[in-house]
Amino acid sequence: MFRRSSRSEPTGHFRARVESCVSTVLELNRKLGEGAIKPEIIQQFERLKESLRHVNEDSVDAKDIHRIEEATNQLLEEIRASVSGDAFPSIYEGEWH
């Protein structure tokens, strides 16, 4: 999945971007309640979260990260559409700036 990248972003940036995607989906699943997101999708994100521990930052390809972010955005749009009648939960509990 990850390949050598031309380094234009700081070390750890790629990992942080993927971790953000994974955390967003898993936290949203927790807030929506079990079964709101297909278990197969949650399993894929949990596997991705686990595999991130073993990824060498030098082997990350920006194109792969972009695909993960795009897939996450598409999933979030589908979830938003499916719960459009319900209040869409906020996963950010901090102070807005």
Image: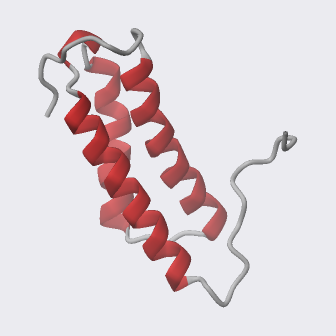
Q: Where is residue 92 shown, x and y percent of the image?
A: 73, 48
71 vs 12, left or right, is left
Quadrant including the C terminus: top right
Nearer-the-camera pick, 9 or 25: 9
Quarter of the rendering containing residue 41: bottom left
Q: Is residue 65 above or below residue 11?
A: below
Q: How far across and down, in percent of the image, does residue 3 sit?
A: 12, 23
Q: Residue at x 30, y 41 (%)?
A: 66
| Residue 6, quarter of the rendered image | top left
* Image quarter in which the N terminus is found: top left
- Residue drawn at x 27%, y 19% is 54
Q: Nearer the viewer, residue 46 or 24?
A: 24
Q: In the picture shown, does residue 2 fall above or below 43?
A: above
Q: Quick check: 52 left or right of 10?
A: left
Q: Residue at x 37, y 15 (%)?
A: 9
Total labels: the figure holds 0
Q: Residue furthest front?
A: 8
Work out whether residue 36 can be spotted.
no
Left or right of 33? Residue 43 is: left
Residue at the spot 49% in from the left edge and 54% down from the top edge: 25
